Image (spheres, helix red, strand yellow):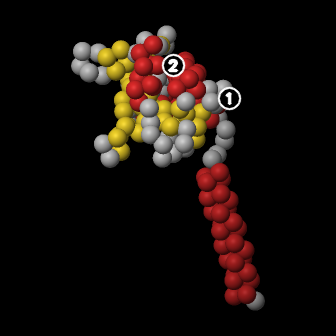
Amino acid sequence: MRYELLLQTMTPGTPYEAARVDALLSERGAVVRPDGVRRWPFKSGDVDIGELREGGQVVATELRVPLSDRPDLMREVIEAAAALATEAGARLVDPQLGRALNGKGDAGVMEQYARTARYAGEVAGVPEALGASSYAQETQGARGFQPTTRMLLIAVGIFVVLYLVVDSLVSQLGGA
């Protein structure tokens, strides 16, 4: 599982300049491995690069960020990809959030990345993603009952009290 970001045209419907983006990626150290996968190296790890095609045309460049318990790579990628997008006349988009990114103040992206990594680690079994132990360290102790549990307990309590009141009234009527 990976977290994907897209480099695409500023204006929908205009042609995407994949060659310009590829040239800028090459200038920044992106290489093609022997197996054909393109990689963009960073200090904290590598990002796979792909193409998004619609109708045979390249409409965007995909940046596939591996899920990890350390968000350093994601921060690096957002900053570098936003700068690359500006230089290429493109925009950086997070399809999970459905919005363009500018490289600054994108805390929502980091939160979504952490949620996705947590899910991958706990549910999908991706070992390098956040596991239950990492998640437990982030929580701030026990918070008591969850709201649905609390509402269920209140409802049960109300029904018990109503039963006792009705039972008491019926026994008084029957005994008189």
Alpha-carbon span between mark 1 and mark 2? 16 Å
Percent x, y of residue 53: 35, 40
Residue with the mark numbered 2: 73
Expressed as whole percent of the image width and height from the top left, the position of residue 112 reads 55, 35
At x 66%, y 73%, the residue is 163
Q: Is residue 55 above or below residue 33?
A: below
Rendered location of residue 124, percent (x, y): 38, 36
Task: Say few, some or many: other residues with alpha carbon within 10 Å of mark 2 (under 14 / 14 to 19 / 20 or more).
Answer: some
Residue found at x 44% / y 40% = 15
Q: Amino acid at mark 2?
A: Leu
Res. 105 mark: 1
Nearest the camera: 59 or 136?
Answer: 59
Q: Nearer the viewer, residue 107 or 58?
A: 58
Residue 174 in the image: above or below residue 34:
below
Amino acid at circle 1: Gly
Residue under the image location 29 percent in, 15 percent down: 33
| Whether residue 115 is visible | no
Contact between marks 1 and 2 (CB within 8 A): the answer is no
Quarter of the image for the C terminus: give it.
bottom right
Q: Which mark is residue 66?
A: none
> Would residue 150 be visible to someone looking at this image?
yes
Quarter of the image for residue 64 reads top left
Q: Residue at x 58, y 26 (%)?
A: 86
Q: Quadrant of residue 65?
A: top left
Q: Residues within 10 Å of mark 1 (few under 14, many from 20)?
A: few
- In the rendering, at what x and y percent does residue 13 appear? 48, 47
State the SS at label 2.
helix
Q: How many numbered discs, if any?
A: 2
Chain-order first, disc 1 or disc 2 = 2
